[in-house]
Structures are given as structure tokens and as C-alpha cells.
Image (cartoon, rainbow, N blue to C red):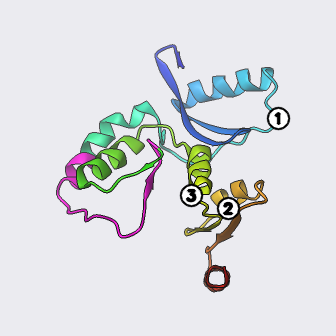
Amino acid sequence: MISNNQIVSLASINSHDQIVISGDASAVNQAIIHCKKLGAKNIFKMNINIPAHSILMKPISKKIKKILNMITIVQPKIPIINNVDVKIEHNQKKIINALIRQIYSTVRWKEIIDFIKSKNILTMLEIGPNQVLSNLNKKDKNITSLNTNNLKNFFIAFKKINQT
């Protein structure tokens, strides 16, 4: 959506009932007002200072491209699903291209989870300081989603993984 030369982008589709928008702050605020009028039940503002996964990040992606072209990416030993195309890439150029595009493109999280489930993978680890993705997966009773946000949880998660 473009309003008064300001941009709002669909940053992430997390589930059938949760989306994230990003863009110019005032345009995002206007979109929030419209979403409330249309019946949005819960709206949360994220505490970030950049328009992540928004077309506004496209100029930054050019800098990222220069950096990525200076490093060697080897073929992954395990499948890595890119969040732009929801597919597994093995080719170095395609991996770099997906990494660049993810800076300014919509994250298709719901489709990624559906893709993973189609491969009969039902236990997932979230490695990082938060539990955002694990919390999204809690709605699906077929998935075991374990967060490794501290050392204790990390060992619990790996113990459970080894038991499956």
C-alpha cells in the first residue's frame, strides 16, 4: 500500500490469522487504524527501528549483495529453506539471491511450516533469544516446537530430538 508517497509492505505471513506489516512509520500507523476499523482483534507494535522485509530495504540489499559476493557459500549439508520462495536451494548463486531478496520481501512463514510438514518433519528447534516462532507453532498440535533460548532449554530440546 502506498499512501502519501509512504509505503506499507506485507513483511511476514506468520499464520492464517497473524501478519506483520512494515514500512514508513506514519503509513504503518495509518494501516493499523484501518485494520482496527476492519475488525483486527490484536495489534502489536514491534520494537524495531528499520522497515524489515519492506521494499524500503531494497537499497540496503545492494550493500548486502556486495558483501555476500565477497564470501564463499558452500553447498549446505542439510536442507535450508529460503523464506522468499519457500524452497530449498543448493546452488551458491541462488542462495545468495534469496538472501538478498529476503531483506525486502515478505517472509512466508506459514508456507514454510506447511512445506516442512509435507516432508514429515514434525519436530523443530528455534535457535535464538526469543520464542516467536515456537509460539506460532504451538497452534499446530502435530508439531513439537522447542526453543533453545537458554542452555537448559537447549539441552532439553536436544534430548527430546534424540528420543524421536
- Calculate the distance from the C-alpha at mark 3 to the C-alpha at mark 1: 33 Å
Q: Nearer the viewer, residue 1 or 142?
A: 142
Question: In the rendered image, which quarter contains the C terminus?
Answer: bottom right
Q: State the residue position of label 3.
A: 119
Of labels 3 and 1, the one closer to you: 3
Give the SS element for disc 1. loop
Question: Amino acid type of disc 2?
Answer: Ser
Question: Amino acid type of disc 1?
Answer: Lys
Count neighbours of disc 2 (C-alpha within 10 A) and say few if under 14, some if 14 to 19, many if 20 or more. Answer: some
- As displayed, is residue 78 above or below residue 34? below
Count neighbours of disc 3 (C-alpha within 10 A) and say few if under 14, some if 14 to 19, many if 20 or more. Answer: few
Q: Which mark is residue 134?
A: 2
Task: Tell me which residue sits at (19%, 53%) in the image.
Answer: 69
Task: Tell me which residue sits at (67%, 62%) in the image.
Answer: 134
Question: Amino acid type of disc 3?
Answer: Lys
Query: Which of the 4 image quarters holds residue 40?
Result: top right
Across and down, in percent, residue 127 comes to: 55, 69
Q: Is residue 47 visible?
A: no
Task: Tell me which residue sits at (46%, 35%) in the image.
Answer: 54
**Between disc 3 and disc 2, whose residue precedes?**
3
- Calculate the distance from the C-alpha at mark 1 to the C-alpha at mark 2: 21 Å
Q: Residue furthest top?
A: 4
Give the SS element for disc 3. loop
Q: Is residue 78 magenta?
A: yes
Question: In the rendered image, which quarter contains the N terminus?
Answer: top right
Q: Is residue 37 visible?
A: yes
Query: Which of the 4 image quarters holds residue 160?
Result: bottom right
- Residues shaded magenta: 64-85
Q: Which mark is residue 41?
A: 1
Task: Tell me which residue sits at (32%, 41%) in the image.
Answer: 60
